[in-house]
Amino acid sequence: MVFILLWYISAACEYSVDFSECHEATIAALITPKDCNEKKPWVIQNLPCDHQCPAGEHLDINITTSTLTCKPCQENTYNIGGGITINSWNLHRHDFSSFCYVLEGKSWKRGANCTSWHASSDEILISGTTDINNWYATDLYLFPYLVKPGKLKLIYRREVSGLGDFFIYVDNFLQYIDMKNPSYDWFTVDIPLECGRHDIQISFINYVTEKISEIAIKEIQIRGTEYADYKCLPCGKGKSTKGADQCLHCEMGSYLDKNECKKCPYGTTSLPGSGNILDCYKLKNCTELDYHYYFSECKDEKKTKIYEWNYPLMCDNNGINLPDMHDIDCGGCPLGEFYNETHCEYCKTGSYIVDSNPGKECLECSAGKYSPKILAFNDWSEIPDQFRTWCMSAENTICSFGWESRGTFIVTSPLYEPGSSIYLETTVEFVEEGSYFSYTFSKSSEANFIVYADGQVKDSFQNEALGSSQHSLSPGNHTLKWLCKHSSILSEHCSLSGIFFHGTRHGGSAACVSCKDGLISKGNQQMCTPCPAGFTSNSNHTLCIPCPSGMFSKGSSKCSQCPPFTIPDKNSEFCTLPDLLTINNKTFQTQKLRGKIGNASDYCKEDRMLKYCYGTFFGPSLHKENLFYVSFANPSEIKMPNYAKVSNMNAYAFGIFPKSSLTLTEIEYLELEDICSEAHNKILVNLGSELSLVNTTNLGFVLEYSNGDHCDKYKKFTTRIEFLCDKYDKEGWPFFSHENGCEISFIWPTIHACKFCSDNDLVVHKGECKDGKREVHYYESENCVFANNTKFVKEIEKCEEKSVIRSWPFLVLAIVSVVLIILASVVLVWIFKIKRTIVLTQAKLSSRSSAGPEE
Ligand SMILES: *[C@@H]1O[C@H](CO)[C@@H](O)[C@H](O)[C@H]1NC(C)=O
Ligand SMILES: *[C@@H]1O[C@H](CO)[C@@H](O)[C@H](O)[C@H]1NC(C)=O
Ligand SMILES: *[C@@H]1O[C@H](CO)[C@@H](O)[C@H](O)[C@H]1NC(C)=O
Ligand SMILES: *[C@@H]1O[C@H](CO)[C@@H](O)[C@H](O)[C@H]1NC(C)=O
Ligand SMILES: *[C@@H]1O[C@H](CO)[C@@H](O)[C@H](O)[C@H]1NC(C)=O
Ligand SMILES: *[C@@H]1O[C@H](CO)[C@@H](O)[C@H](O)[C@H]1NC(C)=O
Ligand SMILES: *[C@@H]1O[C@H](CO)[C@@H](O)[C@H](O)[C@H]1NC(C)=O
Ligand SMILES: *[C@@H]1O[C@H](CO)[C@@H](O)[C@H](O)[C@H]1NC(C)=O
Ligand SMILES: *[C@@H]1O[C@H](CO)[C@@H](O)[C@H](O)[C@H]1NC(C)=O
Ligand SMILES: *[C@@H]1O[C@H](CO)[C@@H](O)[C@H](O)[C@H]1NC(C)=O
């Protein structure tokens, strides 16, 4: 009776159970009846803490016996049976510690310029990195204490292109190693752990290159740190069956059964995330959209059109027949291929094919011409080996399918899970200047079609239903990727019918074209052979011939005339200045400042100049963070292997700039990567590979160097140097003056910018005539020099010593004196005469008067 009553109570009432914390090896349980009016909550004490429950079950109370039991988790809930789950990397940041190291010399240096394991998002922990061309390591440590035997469970993934070694150590013993797992899928590692304290070390070691290489960890579980879980957790993503220790998200066409995804029975399918066999539904009958055709090999100029069901087949083809196969004409092979009896094959290097119908052969490409190679893909009876295809679901897990071949095109199946991304990728080596790739696509309205070259988006189609596109590529290896991103709507698809690469290293040729000027071919060549500097091709492009006199070539090019007033060097490789530069009737002595071609300036051979010259260049001349090296019309190769550089051209001037100060386009940046780390944030830039202008100025002359490295998308660097006549500066110095867009200007005061004095420029000073001779000094005026470096020229001049008497001032003076004397004497005589008359008269008068009265 009591038993029945108890059974009745327990059957009628629901209880919720809450456990206390473990205290002195015991816990208490609070039982709260639900929906039973008769019962009040009660507590059961002194229950042992160490009652164990396995994963998928939680601790419970047998009300009948008041003892601890374990109870399986309900559907769509789970637990790990007592442990730690780290899958929110922000939340659990403090549960682990991580370090990174860089190999310097022979020792690993901790915390050098590197990032350690870190959260890339809340869901993902990724290994870090350091500067490229370095060995790098990162460690993550966990120190769990297990109260019952458990395990370490870790879910990780490796980047597709990634190298590097992934290790897991437990208590300093290597337990897991992944040297190179090519899969992009999430991978689960299970390592059993004994009771007690453990030292878990998760390491990644890698030689860092420009390729992304990393390990992404989605989740780390340590099971066994608790005796049991008190509760089960609801599934986040996915579903679970009763008693599960995890939740699973099953792909389309499968369902969850006993904690495993199983395929639906034949003829049925299911929606993604299905949790029961009952979710598998009968497939619709197949239609003509569910099969495609391909062609057999060509035999007797006929090939067979064969139909086959699509893969994956998501329809019921029971009782439905494919159309009958039938024969048609073979038609031509893809571009650059010929029929070798039954199948298409590339023409051999140096030969080409225009008409690729059966029976036609590849033709020899004659001397002076070449046959550039192409790779054409429009036969899609299978995904060619060069291509990789894969698919990622919206949840970032790998799905089972990729781009599927349909004989004459490839598609992403409309049956794929909504939101999935389907990739097609290949790496192709291009050798031609002016290489390109092109493709033709179509897609359903909501799908997003994106095309990448070397990780950069080249095309993104959202609204277009079909189209084609072409992009040029520089020579080198390029990774091209086509992505079809299905929207959240069901039944999306993209298709690609033709992919075409032009200018590749491998493949066949469909053309025989003339070599460009400066390049030659002996016939049957894939590429023309460049003529060296100083040479160009003959008109037939069969031989390299030297440039005609007065002209130059930098190699692989036509010969060009040197600009006015400049001359080619003796090998006709570039232009320079003559030893005596004469422009507009002004002559300058340039030889000493320039030095011999290819050798340093004569001044640079003096000890005092040791630090101010570098090969044929004067420098470094500083401006802000930039260093400049400038030659005087004497170009040479820049030999500074420590710096990244853009080109290998000879330079008349170059600069070393911080990389960040340049606005080079991405492709140009890619070329600079092979470098030594110490100078790695600087880049060496050619500021002029051609001497393009010489002209006089009022105070000297000006030189311009052009055609340096790319400065921005359209322009190249040029250098302008204004030489100022400065008699007190021998070699002088190139001072940075200003920068105008891509033109860098210098001012260079030097005596070599002073013209030779002409007769009009002289200052003359004549000496006295002595013994029929005198000295005349000719001095340089302020802005000219004598060619021979004397400051003045002394010349002796003949002269006559003329007598004083005959000189006209003397004569005039003499005549004037005579006239004056005559005049004076006349006046004197006259005055004397008058005076005498007066005296006589007075004498006469006085004698007359004295006689008078006396008389
Ligand atoms: C409780 O324990 C008794 C006796 O062991 C057992 O018969 C009963 O089935 C248990 N009840 C539950 C719910 O496990
Ligand atoms: C980190 O890099 C900078 C420049 O890139 C360098 O100056 C510094 O010395 C480096 N630090 C260490 C610890 O290597
Ligand atoms: C599918 O095909 C079968 C036989 O081929 C036919 O009996 C059935 O009616 C078809 N179902 C539909 C929905 O057309
Ligand atoms: C055609 O293929 C056969 C073998 O498949 C090969 O031996 C032969 O050289 C090929 N012919 C040409 C012209 O390439
Ligand atoms: C391109 O890749 C191939 C194979 O990896 C390699 O042999 C070749 O040297 C590479 N070419 C260039 C220009 O890097
Ligand atoms: C170019 O080819 C033609 C015909 O083959 C030949 O007559 C001529 O001499 C060649 N010219 C040179 C410069 O080789
Ligand atoms: C150079 O000098 C000559 C005569 O000496 C004269 O005829 C000519 O005009 C001058 N040219 C210039 C550009 O001054
Ligand atoms: C350049 O200088 C080197 C040694 O300094 C010498 O051997 C070489 O002959 C010189 N070249 C020329 C063209 O003068
Ligand atoms: C050289 O300079 C003169 C005067 O400055 C100018 O008239 C002339 O156009 C310049 N020549 C060139 C080629 O720039
Ligand atoms: C120096 O040059 C001037 C004219 O340029 C010439 O008259 C003189 O004779 C030269 N002197 C010597 C020592 O060569």
Image (spheres, helix red, strand yellow):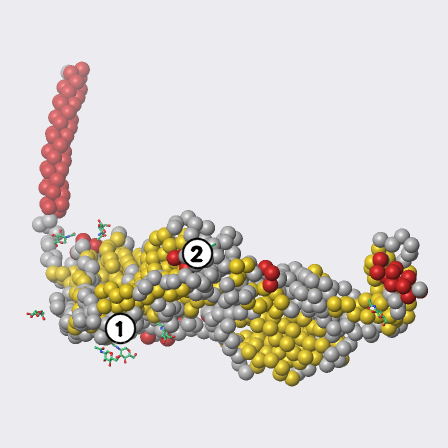
- Residue shown at 28%/67% (left/top)? 304
Drawn side of residue 695 relative to residue 261, left or right:
left
Secondary element at image label 2: loop
User: Which residue type carries mark 1?
Assistant: His
Drawn side of residue 307 relative to residue 342, left or right:
right
For ligand 3, tell me if the residue under mark 2 lies within 8 Å. no
Specify whether residue 351 is in view.
Answer: yes
Spot the residue most to the right: 2
Specify whether residue 742 is in view.
Answer: no
Q: Which mark is residue 321?
A: none
Determine the image quadrant of residue 51. Answer: bottom right
118 or 564, which is in the foreground? 118
Characterize the local packing of mark 2: few (<14), some (14-19) or many (20 or more) Cα atoms within 10 angstroms. many
- Residue shown at 71%/77% (left/top)? 150
For ligand 4, tell me if the residue under mark 1 lies within 8 Å. yes
- Residue shown at 48%/64% (left/top)? 391
468 w.r.t. 406: above or below: above
Where is residue 418 drawn, in percent x and y?
Answer: 51, 56
User: Which residue type carries mark 2?
Assistant: His
Compute the Cα span from label 2 to label 1.
Answer: 31 Å
Which quarter of the figure is the C terminus placed in? top left
Secondary element at image label 1: strand
Q: Earlier in the sequence, mark 2 or mark 1?
A: 1
Where is residue 846 drawn, in percent x and y?
Answer: 17, 21
Residue to which mark 1 is pinned? 343
Determine the image quadrant of residue 187. Answer: bottom right
Which quarter of the figure is the N terminus placed in? bottom right
Residue to which mark 2 is pinned? 493
2 or 313, which is in the foreground? 2
Characterize the local packing of mark 1: few (<14), some (14-19) or many (20 or more) Cα atoms within 10 angstroms. some
Where is residue 507 drawn, in percent x and y?
Answer: 28, 71
555 or 803, which is in the foreground? 555
